[in-house]
Image (cartoon, coloured by chain):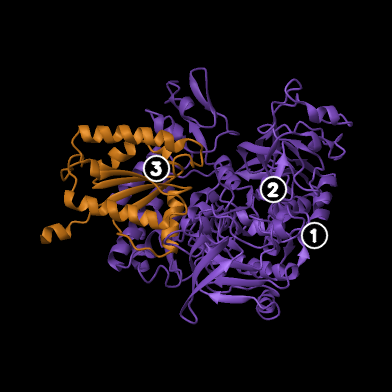
Chain colours: A orange, B purple
Amino acid sequence: MSEQQAYEPKVVAFLCKWCSSAGSDLAGVSRIQYPPNATPITIPCTGAMSPMYILSAFNKGADGVLVSGCHIGDCHYIEGNYLARRKMHLTMELLKFIGVEPDRFRMSWVSAAEGAKFARVVTDFINDLEPLGPQDKLKKVVAND
Amino acid sequence: MTKKRTGVFVCHCGTNIAATVDVAKVAREMADENTVAFTQEYVYMCSEPGQESVVQAIKDNELDSVVVTCCSPNLHEKTFRDNAKRAGINNFTCEIANIREQCSWVHNDKAKGTEKAIKISRSVVRRVNRNKPLEAIAVNVTRKAMVIGGGIAGIQAALDIANAGIEVILVEKQATIGGRMLQLSETFPTLDCSQCVLSPKMVEVKRHPMVKLMTYSEVQELNGSVGNFQVKVLKKPTFVDPDKCKICDHCTEVCPVVVPNEYELNLNARRAIYIPYAQAIPASFTLDENACLGLNPVVCGKCKDVCEAGAINYDMRPETVTENVGAVVVATGFDLYGQENMPELGGGKLEDVLDGLQFERLISASGATKGHVLRPSDHKEPKEVVFIQCVGSRDPAKHCAYCSKICCMYTAKHARLYKKHVPDGRAYVFYIDIRSGGKGYEEFVQRTMEDDDTLYLRGRVSKLYRHNGKVRVLGTDTLTGQNVEIDADMVVLAQAMVPSKGTTEIAKVLKIGRDKDGFLAEAHPKLRPVESVTAGIYLAGAAQAPKDIPETVAQAGAAASKVIALLSQTTLSRSPLIARVRPSHCTGCGMCVDACPFIAIRLEGGKAVVNEALCEGCGSCSATCLRAAIDVKNVTQLQIHEMIEACLA
């Protein structure tokens, strides 16, 4: 049990600049607390989200990856999030195929006005990751030189 | 690549960051990074001495890159990039690590917060390692503006811009400009006639040589960016030539079609050919295509037969025009929260239960009853009228959570105007609180209570229903603790203000954000209240938040001054963070061409080529490229991979 409590999932959160990053800013301005496990990386658009980034994050030891963008229809770049949705769906299938638990990868739509939603998305994600334990399916094991 | 010399500047933000993040530790950890040549912490990095210290440190330590770990880049990215430039290095080698909004403000555990702040800072330091010096792209500015929405906000903004000598296109969806203000009878707190104040402005905007008026028109598409927008506008056919129409009214006399009059909020009817108001601008009739028997002389054609001026033309067709403008002001106004959402108050189906705007038309001299207060059901003068405030407002559980701001004032106005029209009548007002902040507002409400003997009851109404030809109002007076039962001749609901349907539509067309209540979102709630998040698009009026006429006019003036400032420049700089192709890696597969939402990439000689004028830098291309041959400058795939690594170290 104590081992369970010591486990802190490591998460990389890819946030689009226009909606979700601004939404996370609003969560900050509103002082809504959420777990500190997710480290944000701001990208111009979820359309710029290459599946390689997700595999790369798992490979480098992430226990979970979150991708969050503008709501469908609201993309600042017209259709970037449609591209993302298709790509992320295929990525999810690929992850399942190679045996990574589907709960380790999540995509959400958080607008610049949804600070509370951003906090909830991260909180739920971390809660769902905790029972899964550390991810080792794709983690690169580096021998000491 | 020669090794970078990066300076990391850690801001305490007073205690905003320092209370939950160990800033000294962040600075120490960053100093261990291979490329970091200098670190410094300071209590307020954005203060004058803070900024000076950044400039000095860049010069003294021969830094070539800067990372400031502080608040959101939306606030101070420009500040510190300007400082980098001032210190003689390229401004695009300066990046912000957001450890306030995304870290210190949302985590209380200092150890864990510090750990996250270090990860964020380290990832940005790694990103900067591969940042290239870039120059902003200069683009020419189209010295012309578009104002969407022809209410008081749009009219004021258009006039202010036009008076500065800049061409303006004012687009209005309805057959006349004037918007909601034209529907009002009198305005608070002076009780001056709304149309008397507004009509001269409407005429002025119509006659202004720098204003092009497009009524009965809708914005369909917006492309381009600040300084150079291309806006597609649909001009709906009115079937009447406004230059020929003499408003003689002969056509309405013969028109056989009767439909509810939406301009009078369905209190009376109009013909298929109609003029919205006597004061309409343009002063011309409009033929409602959907109501007309068929725009066909064989079927009807009576209006055309009687029109001596020959103004009616059944062959008019919708027309789409593209206008090039440098800036856009959105002033699309409000609607009332629908009664259908409140079944306990009749759900919009009870006779003699009106909304505030209907009451305005009822007491307006130009309205359906020519200014006589007559209730719709039997056209008798109502002797007992109940006004209910906060209908749908301030009710987070069921309706709108916010306060609609103007209802306290216009209800007081309604009660006074009712007493003026029906001196022996009795007015009751149900309220939660009276919010009368504003010049002369509190005095106005006090006079309504005292001089006009209006009975203010503090409490909510639970139910309305018809009873013996009247509307029974069941409510509570919380000050006496009594239940109240009133058999009213008429009930007026002060329904919440919500963004107009057009506002919701235009937000999608222009791709500008909306807040949680659906109003247009401003770029910063305090410091940038008239700008949208998209550069070059400005906001005015009740589309942004509930507000009264003086505030709307002030905001429209502010938006206009922003437009004037923008369009006074001959060139603008555009972000150089756009796509770049490495021809040596490109195989010419064309995947990026298909992925680009802006049609900015084409194949030339088997290699992808980016049109720098069209590229917006979204990066959709880079995500499809299997060989990493195309990347957004300073957000390359390699940089993101290295940032991922830093986040997981």
Label 1 vs label 3, nearer the camera = 1
Which disc number belongs to residue B417? none
In this rendering, position of residue B286 left or right of residue B466: right
- Which residue carries the number 2 mark? B268
Image coordinates for residue A46, horizontal then vertical, percent:
42, 40
User: What kind of element bears circle 1?
Assistant: helix
> Mark 1 or mark 3, which has the lower sequence index?
1
What amino acid type is highlighted by mark number 1? Val
* Cα–Cα span, label 1 and label 2: 25 Å
Image coordinates for residue A83, horizontal then vertical, percent:
42, 33
What amino acid type is highlighted by mark number 2? Asn
Image coordinates for residue A120, horizontal then vertical, percent:
34, 55
- Do the CB atoms of the residues marked 1 and 2 lie less than 8 Å apart? no
Residue B354, above or below B319: below
Q: Can residue A128 be seen from the camera position used here?
A: yes
Question: Badge 2 sits on which subunit?
Answer: B
Question: Badge 3 sits on which subunit?
Answer: B
Image coordinates for residue B357, horizontal then vertical, percent:
65, 57
Q: Are marks 1 and 2 on the same chain?
A: yes
User: What kind of element bears circle 3?
Assistant: helix
- Which residue carries the number 3 mark? B639
* Cα–Cα span, label 3 and label 2: 66 Å
- Which residue carries the number 1 mark? B197
